Image (cartoon, helix red, strand yellow):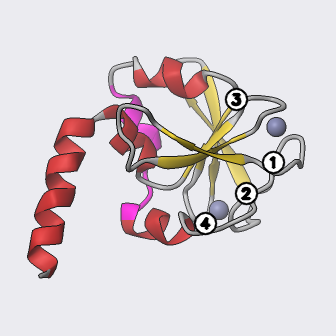
Amino acid sequence: MQCPKCAHEMERVVYNDVEVDRCKLCKGLWFDSREHQILKAMDGSEAIDVGDPEVGELFNTEEKVKCPACHVDMIRMVDSEQPHIWYEGCSVCYGVFFDAGEFRDFKFHTLMDFIRAFRVRERK
Ligand SMILES: [Zn+2]
Ligand SMILES: [Zn+2]
């Protein structure tokens, strides 16, 4: 499978029998339908998200992302509980793509939100 963001090769990563695809370059994560929900509920699953969130943020601005499985344009989705998290979803296969660091963020919102607020303060 090819990364929908940077077109680099993706590798299979297995966590507790759930398989996801991770880009070898940008470390973005591809989840088949509902796998991100299943993994979110699992202890320690954030270990699959090894990328640098700063790199992930650079790829977040990418427009027109195609589903790596069905090659149709994906739609931008926003998590209802954490509106700062933007990810791409396919309306055909229901797969979703998270940029590096976004899955970790999706899983631990309070901690990451705290860190983000802290970072913004530092930059000023
Ligand atoms: Zn990539
Ligand atoms: Zn698809």
Q: Amino acid at mark 3?
A: Asp
Magenta highlight on residue 47: yes
Q: Nearer the viewer, mark 4 or mark 3?
A: 3
Decide if ligand 2 comes within 8 Å of the CB at mark 1. yes
Horizontal and vertical percent for residue 65? 74, 58
Q: Nearer the viewer, mark 4 or mark 1?
A: 1
Residue position for label 3: 32
Alpha carbon of mark 4 to alpha carbon of mark 1: how far? Answer: 15 Å
Q: Amino acid at mark 1?
A: Pro
Horizontal and vertical percent for residue 6? 69, 68
Decide if ligand 1 comes within 8 Å of the CB at mark 2. yes
Residue position for label 4: 25
Residue in the picture at 81% in, 48% down: 68
Residue position for label 1: 68
N-term-proximal mark, 2 vs 4: 2
Tell me the SS state at disc 4. Answer: loop
Tell me the SS state at disc 3. Answer: loop
Alpha carbon of mark 2 to alpha carbon of mark 1: how far? Answer: 7 Å
Alpha carbon of mark 3 to alpha carbon of mark 2: how far? Answer: 14 Å
Horizontal and vertical percent for residue 36? 54, 28
Q: Amino acid at mark 2?
A: Cys
